[in-house]
Protein backbone atom coordinates (compact mmCIF):
# COMPACT_ATOMS: atom_id res chain seq x y z
CA UNK A 1 0.00 0.00 0.00
CA UNK A 2 1.22 3.49 -0.85
CA UNK A 3 2.68 5.49 2.07
CA UNK A 4 0.38 8.50 1.84
CA UNK A 5 1.52 9.89 5.18
CA UNK A 6 5.16 10.20 4.14
CA UNK A 7 4.14 12.10 1.02
CA UNK A 8 2.04 14.52 3.08
CA UNK A 9 4.86 15.01 5.58
CA UNK A 10 7.15 15.94 2.70
CA UNK A 11 4.53 18.30 1.24
CA UNK A 12 4.21 20.03 4.62
CA UNK A 13 7.67 21.54 4.23
CA UNK A 14 6.15 23.72 1.51
CA UNK A 15 3.09 24.72 3.51
CA UNK A 16 2.73 28.49 3.82
CA UNK A 17 0.14 31.24 4.04
CA UNK A 18 -0.39 31.31 0.27
CA UNK A 19 -1.29 27.61 0.17
CA UNK A 20 -3.59 27.94 3.17
CA UNK A 21 -5.32 30.90 1.51
CA UNK A 22 -5.92 28.79 -1.61
CA UNK A 23 -7.38 26.04 0.56
CA UNK A 24 -9.76 28.45 2.30
CA UNK A 25 -10.82 29.84 -1.08
CA UNK A 26 -11.47 26.28 -2.26
CA UNK A 27 -13.71 25.50 0.73
CA UNK A 28 -15.61 28.76 0.28
CA UNK A 29 -16.18 28.02 -3.41
CA UNK A 30 -17.56 24.59 -2.55
CA UNK A 31 -19.72 25.36 0.48
CA UNK A 32 -20.44 29.09 0.07
CA UNK A 33 -19.60 32.21 2.05
CA UNK A 34 -19.88 31.87 5.85
CA UNK A 35 -21.22 28.30 5.59
CA UNK A 36 -18.54 26.93 7.91
CA UNK A 37 -18.92 29.61 10.58
CA UNK A 38 -19.98 28.06 13.88
CA UNK A 39 -20.29 24.59 12.34
CA UNK A 40 -18.69 21.21 13.09
CA UNK A 41 -16.32 19.92 10.41
CA UNK A 42 -15.03 16.38 9.79
CA UNK A 43 -11.99 16.03 7.53
CA UNK A 44 -11.80 12.38 6.39
CA UNK A 45 -8.29 11.63 5.17
CA UNK A 46 -6.82 14.81 6.61
CA UNK A 47 -3.35 14.17 5.12
CA UNK A 48 -1.32 17.26 5.96
CA UNK A 49 -4.15 18.95 7.89
CA UNK A 50 -4.36 21.69 5.25
CA UNK A 51 -8.14 21.70 4.96
CA UNK A 52 -8.65 21.28 8.69
CA UNK A 53 -6.63 24.47 9.10
CA UNK A 54 -8.66 26.17 6.36
CA UNK A 55 -11.97 25.14 7.96
CA UNK A 56 -10.85 26.47 11.31
CA UNK A 57 -9.82 29.79 9.77
CA UNK A 58 -13.22 30.02 8.13
CA UNK A 59 -14.86 29.90 11.55
CA UNK A 60 -15.68 26.24 12.13
CA UNK A 61 -16.70 25.72 15.76
CA UNK A 62 -14.78 22.45 15.97
CA UNK A 63 -12.71 20.37 13.59
CA UNK A 64 -11.98 16.66 13.62
CA UNK A 65 -9.28 15.31 11.32
CA UNK A 66 -9.34 11.60 10.57
CA UNK A 67 -6.71 9.48 8.83
CA UNK A 68 -5.68 5.83 8.82
CA UNK A 69 -1.99 6.79 8.54
CA UNK A 70 -0.23 7.63 11.82
CA UNK A 71 2.28 9.86 10.01
CA UNK A 72 -0.57 11.90 8.57
CA UNK A 73 -2.09 12.36 12.02
CA UNK A 74 1.21 13.56 13.50
CA UNK A 75 1.76 15.84 10.51
CA UNK A 76 -1.76 17.28 10.65
CA UNK A 77 -1.56 17.91 14.38
CA UNK A 78 1.78 19.70 14.08
CA UNK A 79 0.64 21.79 11.12
CA UNK A 80 -2.59 22.75 12.83
CA UNK A 81 -0.76 23.92 15.94
CA UNK A 82 1.58 26.01 13.80
CA UNK A 83 -0.94 27.56 11.43
CA UNK A 84 -4.21 27.61 13.40
CA UNK A 85 -3.03 27.81 17.00
CA UNK A 86 -4.35 26.79 20.40
CA UNK A 87 -7.33 29.11 20.24
CA UNK A 88 -9.03 26.87 17.67
CA UNK A 89 -10.71 23.60 18.61
CA UNK A 90 -9.43 20.56 16.71
CA UNK A 91 -8.63 16.92 17.29
CA UNK A 92 -6.86 14.45 15.04
CA UNK A 93 -7.64 10.76 15.25
CA UNK A 94 -6.04 7.72 13.65
CA UNK A 95 -8.94 5.64 12.41
CA UNK A 96 -10.17 3.88 9.29
CA UNK A 97 -13.25 5.12 7.46
CA UNK A 98 -13.95 1.42 6.83
CA UNK A 99 -14.27 0.70 10.56
CA UNK A 100 -18.01 0.87 11.34
CA UNK A 101 -17.57 1.16 15.10
CA UNK A 102 -14.90 3.86 14.92
CA UNK A 103 -16.94 5.94 12.50
CA UNK A 104 -20.14 5.57 14.54
CA UNK A 105 -18.30 6.72 17.67
CA UNK A 106 -17.50 10.06 16.01
CA UNK A 107 -21.14 11.16 15.96
CA UNK A 108 -22.48 13.47 13.27
CA UNK A 109 -21.20 16.74 11.81
CA UNK A 110 -22.56 19.76 9.98
CA UNK A 111 -19.99 19.34 7.21
CA UNK A 112 -18.08 16.24 6.17
CA UNK A 113 -15.21 16.72 3.72
CA UNK A 114 -13.17 14.05 1.95
CA UNK A 115 -11.20 15.12 -1.11
CA UNK A 116 -9.54 12.34 -3.07
CA UNK A 117 -9.56 9.80 -0.23
CA UNK A 118 -12.39 7.28 -0.37
CA UNK A 119 -11.16 5.76 -3.64
CA UNK A 120 -7.89 4.79 -1.91
CA UNK A 121 -9.46 2.73 0.89
CA UNK A 122 -9.85 -0.57 -0.96
CA UNK A 123 -13.63 -0.48 -0.52
CA UNK A 124 -14.97 2.81 -1.85
CA UNK A 125 -18.65 1.86 -1.48
CA UNK A 126 -18.30 1.04 2.21
CA UNK A 127 -16.13 4.09 2.83
CA UNK A 128 -18.76 6.34 1.24
CA UNK A 129 -21.57 4.73 3.24
CA UNK A 130 -19.67 5.23 6.52
CA UNK A 131 -18.78 8.83 5.64
CA UNK A 132 -22.45 9.49 4.82
CA UNK A 133 -23.51 8.32 8.29
CA UNK A 134 -21.37 11.06 9.82
CA UNK A 135 -23.44 13.81 8.19
CA UNK A 136 -26.22 15.15 10.38
CA UNK A 137 -29.72 15.57 8.83
CA UNK A 138 -29.56 18.72 6.75
CA UNK A 139 -25.76 18.71 6.84
CA UNK A 140 -23.43 18.73 3.87
CA UNK A 141 -21.06 16.16 2.39
CA UNK A 142 -18.26 16.95 -0.04
CA UNK A 143 -16.34 14.18 -1.77
CA UNK A 144 -13.94 14.06 -4.71
CA UNK A 145 -13.62 10.74 -6.54
CA UNK A 146 -11.45 9.72 -9.50
CA UNK A 147 -13.36 9.81 -12.77
CA UNK A 148 -13.89 6.58 -14.72
CA UNK A 149 -11.95 6.68 -18.00
CA UNK A 150 -10.83 4.10 -20.56
CA UNK A 151 -7.30 4.45 -19.18
CA UNK A 152 -8.31 3.87 -15.54
CA UNK A 153 -7.51 0.10 -15.55
CA UNK A 154 -4.07 0.89 -17.00
CA UNK A 155 -3.39 3.41 -14.26
CA UNK A 156 -4.51 0.87 -11.67
CA UNK A 157 -1.86 -1.52 -12.95
CA UNK A 158 0.79 1.23 -12.91
CA UNK A 159 -0.06 2.08 -9.29
CA UNK A 160 0.13 -1.60 -8.32
CA UNK A 161 3.51 -1.85 -10.04
CA UNK A 162 4.82 1.24 -8.22
CA UNK A 163 4.01 -0.30 -4.85
CA UNK A 164 5.73 -3.54 -5.79
CA UNK A 165 8.87 -1.78 -7.03
CA UNK A 166 11.79 -0.88 -4.79
CA UNK A 167 12.86 2.70 -4.09
CA UNK A 168 14.89 2.93 -7.32
CA UNK A 169 11.98 1.60 -9.39
CA UNK A 170 9.59 4.03 -7.73
CA UNK A 171 11.85 7.01 -8.47
CA UNK A 172 12.21 5.81 -12.06
CA UNK A 173 8.44 5.61 -12.51
CA UNK A 174 7.99 9.12 -11.11
CA UNK A 175 10.58 10.59 -13.47
CA UNK A 176 9.03 8.74 -16.42
CA UNK A 177 5.49 9.89 -15.73
CA UNK A 178 6.11 13.41 -14.40
CA UNK A 179 6.70 14.98 -17.86
CA UNK A 180 3.86 12.92 -19.35
CA UNK A 181 1.42 14.14 -16.71
CA UNK A 182 2.70 17.72 -17.02
CA UNK A 183 2.20 17.81 -20.80
CA UNK A 184 -1.16 16.03 -20.63
CA UNK A 185 -2.53 18.48 -18.04
CA UNK A 186 -1.26 21.45 -20.03
CA UNK A 187 -2.79 20.18 -23.29
CA UNK A 188 -6.17 19.54 -21.65
CA UNK A 189 -6.45 22.65 -19.47
CA UNK A 190 -4.12 25.14 -21.22
CA UNK A 191 -2.98 26.11 -17.71
CA UNK A 192 0.40 25.82 -16.01
CA UNK A 193 0.26 22.49 -14.10
CA UNK A 194 2.59 23.90 -11.44
CA UNK A 195 -0.08 26.45 -10.49
CA UNK A 196 -2.47 24.15 -8.71
CA UNK A 197 -5.73 25.01 -7.03
CA UNK A 198 -6.52 24.21 -3.40
CA UNK A 199 -2.96 24.96 -2.24
CA UNK A 200 -1.60 21.64 -3.49
CA UNK A 201 1.82 20.94 -5.06
CA UNK A 202 2.38 19.44 -8.51
CA UNK A 203 5.32 17.16 -7.65
CA UNK A 204 3.66 15.65 -4.57
CA UNK A 205 0.46 15.20 -6.55
CA UNK A 206 2.40 13.30 -9.22
CA UNK A 207 3.82 10.97 -6.56
CA UNK A 208 0.32 10.48 -5.15
CA UNK A 209 -1.11 9.88 -8.60
CA UNK A 210 1.49 7.38 -9.79
CA UNK A 211 1.69 5.54 -6.46
CA UNK A 212 -1.74 5.99 -4.88
CA UNK A 213 -2.97 2.44 -4.31
CA UNK A 214 -5.55 0.97 -3.59
CA UNK A 215 -7.32 2.78 -6.43
CA UNK A 216 -10.97 2.90 -7.52
CA UNK A 217 -12.94 5.23 -9.77
CA UNK A 218 -16.51 6.00 -10.83
CA UNK A 219 -18.38 7.99 -13.45
CA UNK A 220 -20.37 11.08 -12.51
CA UNK A 221 -23.64 9.22 -13.16
CA UNK A 222 -22.64 6.23 -11.05
CA UNK A 223 -21.53 8.35 -8.12
CA UNK A 224 -24.61 10.58 -8.35
CA UNK A 225 -26.85 7.52 -8.20
CA UNK A 226 -24.95 6.14 -5.21
CA UNK A 227 -25.17 9.42 -3.30
CA UNK A 228 -28.91 9.66 -3.97
CA UNK A 229 -29.38 6.08 -2.74
CA UNK A 230 -27.73 7.14 0.52
CA UNK A 231 -30.28 9.92 0.97
CA UNK A 232 -28.42 12.94 -0.41
CA UNK A 233 -29.58 15.77 -2.58
CA UNK A 234 -26.89 16.70 -5.10
CA UNK A 235 -26.18 20.43 -4.90
CA UNK A 236 -23.09 20.76 -7.09
CA UNK A 237 -21.11 18.51 -9.39
CA UNK A 238 -17.78 19.72 -10.74
CA UNK A 239 -16.44 17.41 -13.43
CA UNK A 240 -12.72 16.65 -13.40
CA UNK A 241 -10.59 19.16 -15.28
CA UNK A 242 -8.64 16.24 -16.79
CA UNK A 243 -10.19 12.88 -17.83
CA UNK A 244 -8.64 10.83 -15.01
CA UNK A 245 -8.90 13.57 -12.38
CA UNK A 246 -11.38 13.88 -9.54
CA UNK A 247 -15.05 14.76 -9.94
CA UNK A 248 -16.27 16.88 -7.02
CA UNK A 249 -19.68 16.37 -5.43
CA UNK A 250 -21.34 18.65 -2.88
CA UNK A 251 -24.59 17.33 -1.45
CA UNK A 252 -27.02 17.74 1.42
CA UNK A 253 -28.44 14.98 3.62
CA UNK A 254 -31.98 14.55 4.79
CA UNK A 255 -33.94 13.48 1.73
CA UNK A 256 -35.53 10.07 1.48
CA UNK A 257 -33.58 7.42 -0.39
Image (cartoon, rainbow, N blue to C red):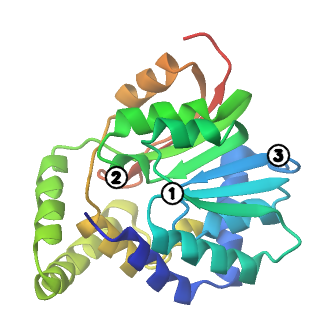
Instruction: Tell me the crowding category of disc 2: few under 14, some 14 to 19, or many 20 or more residues within 10 angstroms, Cα based.
Output: many
User: Residue 98 at x, y = what percent?
Assistant: 42, 42
The residues tagged by marks 1 and 3 sit, at their Cα atoms, a distance apart of: 19 Å
User: Residue 53 at x, y = what percent?
Assistant: 71, 68
Q: Residue at position x 43%, y 53% from top? A: 117
- Check the image and report above or below for 254 versus 243: above
Task: Find residue 120 and name its label.
Answer: 2
State the quadrant of the C terminus.
top right
Task: Find residue 45 and name its label.
Answer: 1
Instruction: Tell me the crowding category of disc 3: few under 14, some 14 to 19, or many 20 or more residues within 10 angstroms, Cα based.
Output: some
State the quadrant of the N terminus.
bottom left
User: Residue 25 at x, y = what percent?
Assistant: 70, 62
Secondary structure category for the residue under label 3: loop
- Whichever of callouts 1 and 3 sits on the residue coming sooner in the sequence is 3
Is residue 193 visible to the viewer in this orientation of the structure? no
Secondary structure category for the residue under label 1: loop
Quarter of image, res 192: bottom left
Quarter of image, res 76: bottom right
34 lies left or right of 5: right
* Residues marked 1 and 2 touching at CB (< 8 Å): yes
Q: Residue at position x 26%, y 54% from top? A: 214
- Whichever of callouts 1 and 2 sits on the residue coming sooner in the sequence is 1
Amino acid sequence: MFKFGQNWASFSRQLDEARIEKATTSLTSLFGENTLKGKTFLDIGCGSGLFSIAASRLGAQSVVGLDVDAVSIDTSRANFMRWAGNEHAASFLQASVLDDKQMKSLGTFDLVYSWGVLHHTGNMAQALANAAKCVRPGGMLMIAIYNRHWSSPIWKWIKWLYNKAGSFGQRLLIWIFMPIIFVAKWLVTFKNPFKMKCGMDFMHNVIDWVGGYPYEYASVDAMTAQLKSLGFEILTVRPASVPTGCNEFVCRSGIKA
